Every structure is written in C-alpha cells, then in structure tokens.
Amino acid sequence: MLIDFKYNKAIKMRLFTVALFIILSIAGVGFAFYLFYIANTIPMFLLAIAFMMLSLIAAFFNIYASVWYFRSIFYDDYLKKISKNNKMPKILPNIAIIVPTFNENPEILGNNILELLKMNYPKNKLKFYIADDSTNSETVSKIKEFATKYHIKFVHRNNRDGFKAGALNNILKISKEPYIAIFDADELLENKNFIIDLLPYFNDKKVSFVQTEKRYKKGSFFSDSVDIFDGFFFKFIEPARALNNTAVFAGSCGIIKRSILNKIGGFPEYIIEDTFFSFESSIRNLKSIYIPKVYARGEPIKTFTHLAKQQWRYNYGDTQFISYFLKKKNNNESPFSKLDYTTHGLGLNYISIMLILFTLVSAGTIFLDVPFAHIDIASFFTHNQIGLDLEMLGLFAFTLSVFTPVILTKIYFGSLKKGLMVFMLNFALAFVRTNAAISAIIKKNPINSWNSFRHMQKRNDLFTSIINAKTEIVFSTFLLFLAFIAFSESNLAGGIWLVGYSCLYFLTLIFFYVYG
C-alpha cells in the first residue's frame, strides 16, 4: 500500500511537470500570436515571425522534455522486467579496467585506483590499464611509478590524437579482454559490486553497454548546484531514453562489450566519443542499459572556469554530432530514436542560442509599437485590465521560464536556491556554449580553442574575470544602454525588462569573480 502511495505521488509529480512545460509552451506561442495581431508595420511583422519561430522551437523542446520526464517513471518497472533472470555467467570473463588520464593529480588518481583494485571480482580476471596522455613530465613520472608498484599496465602517448577516444583505442590495440570498464581519473568507487551487478545484463547477447548514474561528490553550494545541473539528465532523460534503446554511454562508470567496439572500429575519435559510440551502437540495433544507481563519484566542479570549459567541450562535441548524425541516416531507427538523438545534439545549442535570440527579439518588442512595453508609472496603476491583457502572456512566459527549473529542482532535489542557481547558470553559460557551437561549425581546432577561450584564474581576481567575461560584459552594457533609452522615453516596463536581462548576462562576470 505504501509502495502504491509513493508511485501515485510520483505520477502526480510527473504530470505536474508535464503541465508546467505545456503551459510554458502555450504562453510563448500565445504571445507570438499576439504580436501578429497587433503588427501594423513590416518591422513588427518580421519581429512577430522571429518570435513565433523561436516560440515553436521552444515549445517542441519543452513538450519533448515533458515526455522524457513522464516516461522516466516507468523505467524501474522496465529494469526489473529485463533483470528477472539475471545471473552471473558460469565462466567469469576477463575484464579490462581502463582509467584515461590527462595531467590529472597523481595522488587523487592513485587513491581512486586503489579503490578500484578492491572490486568484488576475482583478481586474476581483472587487468588494469592507465591510458596516459599527460604532457607534464613530473606527472607522467609519478603515475608511471605508481603503476609499476601495483602491477598496472601503464601506456603513455606523446600526443593527444583522437583525444580521450584515441587514448582508449590505443589500449584496445594491446588488450584482449572481452569486456571493458572505464573510470575517469577523478572518480572514487563507492560500491565494490560494480561488475557483479552489471555483468549479468550481458546475458542478452544484443546488449552493447551498461551505463550507471554519474554524479559528483558533495562540495560547496556552487559545486552541489552543478551536480544538480547534470542530475536532471541522469534522473529523467537517461532512463526515458533507455526505454527507447538510446541510452547514452556517459564516458565512464560503465561496461562495454569489446566485440561491439571491434565492429564499430573502436571509439569514434571525436571530442565527446561517448555520444558518438552510443549512436553507432544504436544504429546497429543493439541494446543499451542504464542503471540508475551511483557506483562512483567524481571530484566536484569547484570553479566556474572548470564548468565553462566542460560546457564548451560538450557543446563543441554536440554540434559536431549533429552533422555526423544527419550524414548517417538509418531507416531502421524508430521515430523516438531519431528524436532522441536530434534533441541530444541540439540540446545545449537550444538552451544557449535560444536564450540570446529571445533576448534580442524581446528587446525588439520594446522599441516597436507593442502596448505593454509603453506603460508608464501612472498608467500601470490605473490600467484596470493589466492582468487580463493578452500581451501579459509574454511576461507570464518569461516568469514561468524562471520558475520552472526552480520548482522542479525543489520537487526532485529538495532545494529552491540550487534551482535558482541552475536557472542563472544557463544564462551565464549562454555565450560560452554559443562560442563552442560556432567553433565546431567553422572547424576550429578544439584543443587550441578549448584551452585558450577562457583564462584560468583564482577567485576574487577581477582583472582576469573581466577578460574572461568580456563578451557578456559588452552584451550586458548594450542592454543597459537600451534600458536607459527606454526609461528616458517613459517606457517603464521595457526598461525593467532590459535591466533584468542585462543582470542575467552580467552573472558570467560575477561567477568568474566569486567562484574562480
């Protein structure tokens, strides 16, 4: 009875989530229709068209996201069903444990590998590899010394050809184990039954890989908010996609069948090899399993610079993936599978570029003949129908877009403050991700761009913060200038709107300064 109550409560929460996304979509599209209704000049018609296109794209992503949120609740039942007859194979296979490294802290790496060595699995069936691409000679020397001491195969490359995928493929050339488990250098094993729990899923010969939930260790308010930032993917999107057989191998904390890698030709050598590998597995009609359980936790993301670089890499890779995906059309894929990979590739671009475009279009509504943007202080308090006017849908849509992530974070992760931080981080990272998308489109060298687009800095370093956030500062200042013009023309609503947007993009500078 208690189980039924919890299940029904979870269903209601998911339905509430779906309702939020649908209302948000209706509000945005409704305001776009209103712009068409009042348009009486060519610039206003163009503005209405732009807003309608953005609103329809946003509605598609919002509604599809609500499908993910709702379907994810059924994943536990699905997992129980497919794991009913899970048994360990009579003859235990050899397994390669690979830890890729690139200038990682040798002490953290060493401690984490020592925990991996304690896994509950016959020690003679495990072979450990360190795939090292470090460029710091002292780091290389310390890692090699550690590997020698604990009889771990140490493989060093003097170049980063193929990035992490290249390092993994290099190990594939010298290893023979039929299964490969990957852990990042900063991930500390928490559950030693990792192999025992995951291996039985491979009794189904069509299973390509089994992925577990990836999370970070507890840290500061900022790093815990970033953990939630990623937590939405693993709590809702990954299980919903696993129902469509499009779960994403997340790069570590998972096991892959080697024979599948042999068929694919190894890991695709792109900056986010995990997504490309997952797609190659999917188009071969192979199965992917996701286990919503944490077996290892990575080091928390402590600085905004670290987060910005991570998001830059993700979006550069996702933009590359969209081109790759479109070239490899497969008629055997289901419509859901195609939608899953389309939305995955466009996801960060949607969040970032759409925010910037919505900001610009919203600024356009302020300086054209849109009634709500020209309400002065006196008329604001005497306008009897202010709460009923159709133009208020625009303000309602923006307000709901603020509160949706805040509400969802409170419901599913128990924190309003962290929900607000998640919302603010999307604005603070908008230009970072857009920069990455442009870099991928024009095919800039990802290593040079990735390492140089933001300078590493210490906290409370104002000069470096200004350099890092110069694009956002210019954009915020431009919006403040427009706000000044709006206020000077007694355009109260428009001026407040622009000041609000300016503050959101100015957060990039604040986050660089406060969090480093």
Image (cartoon, rainbow, N blue to C red):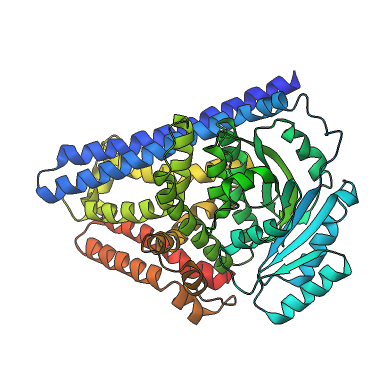
Q: Total number of numbered labels?
A: 0
Q: Nearer the viewer, residue 292 or 181?
A: 181
Horizontal side of residue 393 vs 368, given as left or right: right
Q: Residue at x 49, y 34 (%)?
A: 337
- Residue at x-position 70% and y-position 30%: 204
- In screen coordinates, is 70 left or right of 505? right
> In which quadrant of the rendered image does the C terminus lie?
bottom right
- Residue sitting at x 32%, y 54%: 357
Residue at horizontal 47 percent and vertical 53 percent from the top: 318
Q: Position of residue 450 (x, y in %)?
A: 50, 69
Where residue 464 sits: x, y (%)?
A: 50, 79
Question: Residue 416 at x, y = what percent?
Answer: 58, 47
Left or right: 222 in relation to 453? right
Q: Does residue 455 appear in this view?
A: yes
Q: What is the x, y in percent for residue 49?
A: 21, 44
Query: Quarter holding the N terminus?
Result: top right
Quadrant of the rendered image containing residue 87:
top right
Vertical order, 247 against 482 (above or below): above
- Toward the top, the furthest residue is 1
Answer yes or no: is residue 249 visible.
no
Q: Nearer the viewer, residue 392 or 248?
A: 248
* Above or below, comparing residue 329 to residue 417 in the picture: above
Would you identify the image quadrant in which residue 330 lies?
Answer: top left
